[in-house]
Image: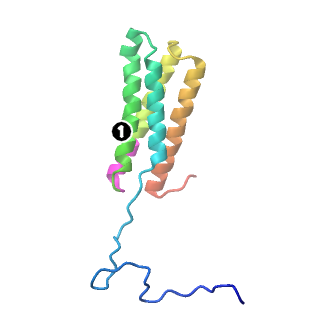
């Protein structure tokens, strides 16, 4: 047919692949992985939101509850950043498991802030949406790292 290009099978010496001076492939054996920026950005946004809300707590509540909530959110953010830049393997899985524990602690602290009326119901619901979204993303990342599918 005219006007239609047919695919040519690649030759043994394909000019599109870079080679070094001895004619061997110079491509690295492993692809460089990009960090999962979306989950890190979401964790950063959650940390900022929590930090802003804690600033409005009373001094006593800020000392007893607020600083722990900020620390838990910051643990999530920093561990996600560490996991993003860690090579695949047990270290990354350990970081992601720690993120899950920090998310569980954060949920408890935010619930306590709501129950003690430092957060409104609407603020608590928003915070839970942020934390649940992070939990879903981390869970998906863990499943991908372990190579398992969701049941």
Question: From what the image shows, is residue 86 above or below residue 77?
Answer: below
Whether residue 8 can be seen here? yes
Q: Residue 143, position in %: x, y?
A: 48, 52
Q: What element does badge 1 sit on?
A: helix
The answer to which image quadrant residue 102 occupies is top left
* Residue depicted at x 44% and y 30%: 47
Whether residue 109 can be seen here? no
Q: Residue 1, position in %: x, y?
A: 72, 90
Is 67 within the magenta? no
Question: From what the image shows, is residue 83 above or below residue 119?
Answer: below
Residue labelled with disc 1? 78
Which of the two residues, 26 or 123, is positioned nearer the viewer here? 26
The answer to which image quadrant residue 33 occupies is bottom left
Badge 1 local density, few (<14 within 10 Å), some, or many (20+)? some
Magenta segment's dominant SS is helix
Is 94 within the magenta? yes
The stretch in magenta equals 88-98
Which of the two residues, 128 or 1, is positioned nearer the viewer here? 1
Q: Residue 63, position in %: x, y?
A: 36, 14
Of all residues, the one furthest to the left in this rendering is 22
Q: Residue 27, position in %: x, y?
A: 35, 73
């Amino acid at each position: 047919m005219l006007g239609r290009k047919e695919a040519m099978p690649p030759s043994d010496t394909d000019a599109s692949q870079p080679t070094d001076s001895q004619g061997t492939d110079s491509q690295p054996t492993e692809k460089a992985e990009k960090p999962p920026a979306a989950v890190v950005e979401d964790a950063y946004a959650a940390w900022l939101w929590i930090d802003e809300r804690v600033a409005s707590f009373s001094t006593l509540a800020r000392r007893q509850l607020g600083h722990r909530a900020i620390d838990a959110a910051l643990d999530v953010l920093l561990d996600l950043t560490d996991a993003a830049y860690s090579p695949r393997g047990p270290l990354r899985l350990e970081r992601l498991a720690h993120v899950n524990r920090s998310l569980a602690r954060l949920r408890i602290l935010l619930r306590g802030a709501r129950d003690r009326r430092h957060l409104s119901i609407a603020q608590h619901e928003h915070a839970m949406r942020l934390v649940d979204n992070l939990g879903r993303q981390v869970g998906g990342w863990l499943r991908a790292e372990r190579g398992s599918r969701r049941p």
